[in-house]
Image (cartoon, helix red, strand yellow):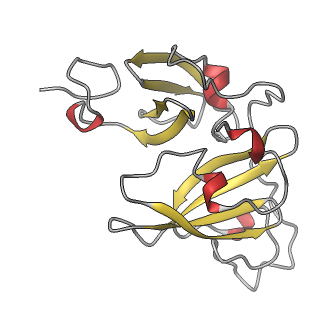
Amino acid sequence: MTAGDVKSADCPSGATLQKLVELPKDMTFGKVECVKDWAGADPQGPKAGDGVYLFHYTAGTGWKYYGEGSGYDCKDLGLTVPAPFCISDPATTTTKPATAKPATTKPATTKPVTTSPTCPSAKTLGSLVELPKGVTFGKVECVKDWAGADPQGPKAGDGVYLFHYTAGTGWKYYGEGSGYDCKDLGLTVPAPFCISD
């Protein structure tokens, strides 16, 4: 299945959101809670932490992965009402909300590559995640069924966004950061986005 059915503004199911990210082995999304154009998915499994996976809906591009963790500030998400996946400060809920982070890429007709593990473009990978304002993907480097995208912009860190290709579902967000171990990714050859012995 492709991620084409994630374009509805209705609160998505856990199964629908799992098409956008690659969860660790033996994990699934349990309860999904939505407020306005945000969805928080609770990971379930033996290695699940106490954070949530957060997704944001943008008209024209659909649901995109936003981040994972805990302690999101509702006002930073542009929410003036309490939400189960963010912290509200009652003293500030009457003030004008911050604008939600806009997507930096809006490929309304671009869908993730689902038929071939050919190295995807930065634009294709940008359609899978919501990047911070002013950040875009620069160079994309691929090894086997993995793609590392280098974020570019004033708030870009020194890590990479990592994506994994699975036959039948296509490219999915895997994680972001640095110091990935190539062996943990199943790679026996060197790759620019992981460390090999």
Residue 96 lies, in percent from the top left, at 88, 67
**Residue 136 visible somewhere in the drawing:** no
Which residue is at 29% across, 28% downward?
A: 194
Q: Nearer the viewer, residue 5 or 32?
A: 5
Q: Quadrant of residue 93?
A: bottom right
Q: Residue furthest bottom?
A: 90
Viewport quadrant of the N terminus: top right
Q: Nearer the viewer, residue 132 or 46?
A: 46
Viewed as shown, does residue 129 lie left or right of 57?
left
Viewport quadrant of the C terminus: top left
Viewed as shown, does residue 181 lie left or right of 28?
left
Viewed as shown, does residue 197 lie left or right of 173?
left
Q: Quadrant of residue 44?
A: bottom left
Image height of 183 relative to 82, above or below: above
Image height of 56 relative to 108, above or below: below
**Residue 189 visible somewhere in the drawing:** yes
Which residue is at 65% across, 28% downward?
A: 112
Q: Quadrant of residue 142?
A: top left
Residue 16 lies, in percent from the top left, at 66, 53
Residue 32 lies, in percent from the top left, at 65, 68
Image height of 28 relative to 153, above or below: below
Residue 48 lies, in percent from the top left, at 39, 67
Which residue is at 59% across, 21% downward?
A: 115
Which residue is at 63% across, 50% downward?
A: 66
The mark tally for this picture is 0
Image height of 76 relative to 126, above or below: below
